Image (cartoon, rainbow, N blue to C red):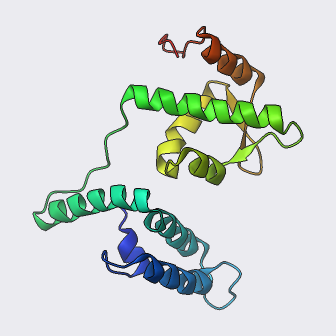
Amino acid sequence: MFVDHYEILQISPNADAETIRRVYRMQAQRFHPDNLESGNAAAFRRISDAYEVLIDPNRRAAYDRDHREARKREAIGVPVSPPAGPPVMDEMRRREEILALLYSRRFSHPQQPSLGLRDLEALLNTPKGDLEFSLWYLKESGYLIRTDSAHHTITLKGVQFAEGLKTGTAKWLDGVQG
């Protein structure tokens, strides 16, 4: 289901970046879980998610296209359906990028080899929703694990696969060359 980030932040789709920041700060302060009077963790997360999309010019431009389409569909009474999945090659490329980042992190920081979802979002410039399927696939395939602190770490199998990607010998479980 389509999430209206403008409605969540209670701002106009024409709002500038400074307005978005100002309104976010007010809403975040109001709903922060540490606020004993009006704290609401779920509302705070929705506000934070909306802010992260709308403050980034590239993500906002993509979101605005979806927002306009959703508004059009809503105006004529057509239900807003979830977006179709990404093309298979884009998904495979994203998995390879995730493994490459986790491989590099394991190699360069052996004492702290994991990355959180927000780290991956920022490094790949990809929204959380687009990463979730990729991370699920890599976890279920045994290429990474998710720690108790919600960080992702490459496994031995993942290291071998990432190295196979560099040498051209890796194959995804579906048999397609990486």
Is 101 or 6 nearer to us in this picture?
A: 101
**In the image, farthest residue toward the left:** 76
| Residue found 71% across the figure and 45% down from its top | 115
Q: Is residue 94 visible?
A: yes
Q: Quadrant of residue 29?
A: bottom right
| Residue found 53% across the figure and 43% down from its top | 132
Q: Quadrant of residue 104?
A: top right
Q: Is residue 139 visible?
A: no
Query: Residue 25's x, y, as percent?
Result: 57, 82
Task: Look at the picture and state if 161 lies above or below 12.
Answer: above
Question: Is residue 59 rendered to the left or right of residue 145?
Answer: left
Question: Is residue 133 rendered to the left or right of residue 150?
Answer: left
Task: Look at the picture and state if 134 lies above or below 17.
Answer: above
Question: Is residue 10 rendered to the left or right of residue 157?
Answer: left
The N terminus lies in quadrant: bottom left
Query: Residue 90's x, y, as percent?
Result: 42, 31
Is 173 or 25 nearer to us in this picture?
A: 25
